[in-house]
Amino acid sequence: MSINLEFNSVCGVNFNVVLFLRIVTVVIDAYVPLKKIRSAVKYCIKCPILIILNVLFVKKAALWRRYRVDKSLENKNQYSNQAAHCKKLVLDFEKAKEIRVVNKANIGSFYRYVNRCLSGRTFEISHRRFDNR
């Protein structure tokens, strides 16, 4: 395909732009590798509670913006109720995740989970035994 022959035709600017874009697309498809993008959809299908949490956090953020503009008691109560609800759901989600790890009865997955949760800054030693003594 000769570029000079295609652009020398007297068909107008729009036709020449379309031809140029077609040539550029062919070159890009031939020489630029495609980048694989991992989708988070697979993870969301497994955990639909994360979608619900995301919706609730968006609602909480909207209530915070409303309260920041108009500091009425009603806005404050709505925001604090939504924040408490979000906190409860997150704690319930974390609790359910820990129960799933324990019920799996796989010592390897248990230690992987514990090591993921521990870090130097958030490490706290429990001062109580399991039987509360």
Image (spheres, rainbow, N blue to C red):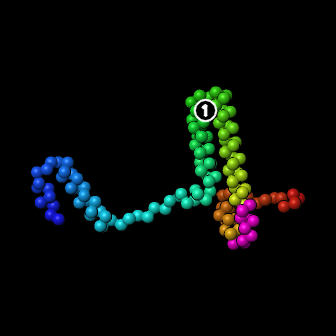
**Quarter that holds the N terminus:** bottom left
Q: Quadrant of residue 104?
A: bottom right
Q: Position of residue 39 (x, y in %)?
A: 50, 59
Q: Amino acid at mark 1?
A: Tyr
For mark 1, does the 10 Å Cα neighbourhood hold few (<14), some (14 to 19), or many (20 or more) residues? some
> Mainly helix, strand or loop, the magenta region?
helix
Q: Nearer the viewer, residue 103 or 76?
A: 103
Q: Position of residue 14 (x, y in %)?
A: 20, 48
Q: Residue 28's x, y, as percent? A: 29, 62
The x, y position of residue 69, in whole percent, is: 56, 30
106 within the magenta span:
yes
Judging from the image, what secondary structure is the residue with disc 1 in?
Answer: helix
Query: Residue sitting at 41 percent across and 64 percent down?
Result: 35
* Location of residue 45 (image quadrant): bottom right
Point 10% across, 51% down: residue: 10
State the residue position of label 1: 67
**Residue in front for this viewpoint, 117 or 119:** 117
Quarter residue 64 falls in: top right
Does 89 sit above or below residue 40? above
- Relative to the observer, which residue lies in front, 84 or 27? 27
Of the pair 122 and 13, the residue shown nearer to us:
13
Relative horizontal placement of residue 121, taking residue 14 as reference (left or right): right
* The C terminus: image quadrant: bottom right
Is 10 part of what is drawn in magenta?
Answer: no
Question: In the image, is residue 80 above or below residue 53?
Answer: above
Relative to 15, 28 lies left or right: right
Numbered range of the magenta stretch: 99-108
Residue occupying image coordinates x 69% and y 55%: 94
Q: Is residue 12 left or right of residue 36?
A: left
- Seen in the picture, residue 92 relative to 2 is either above or below; the reply is above
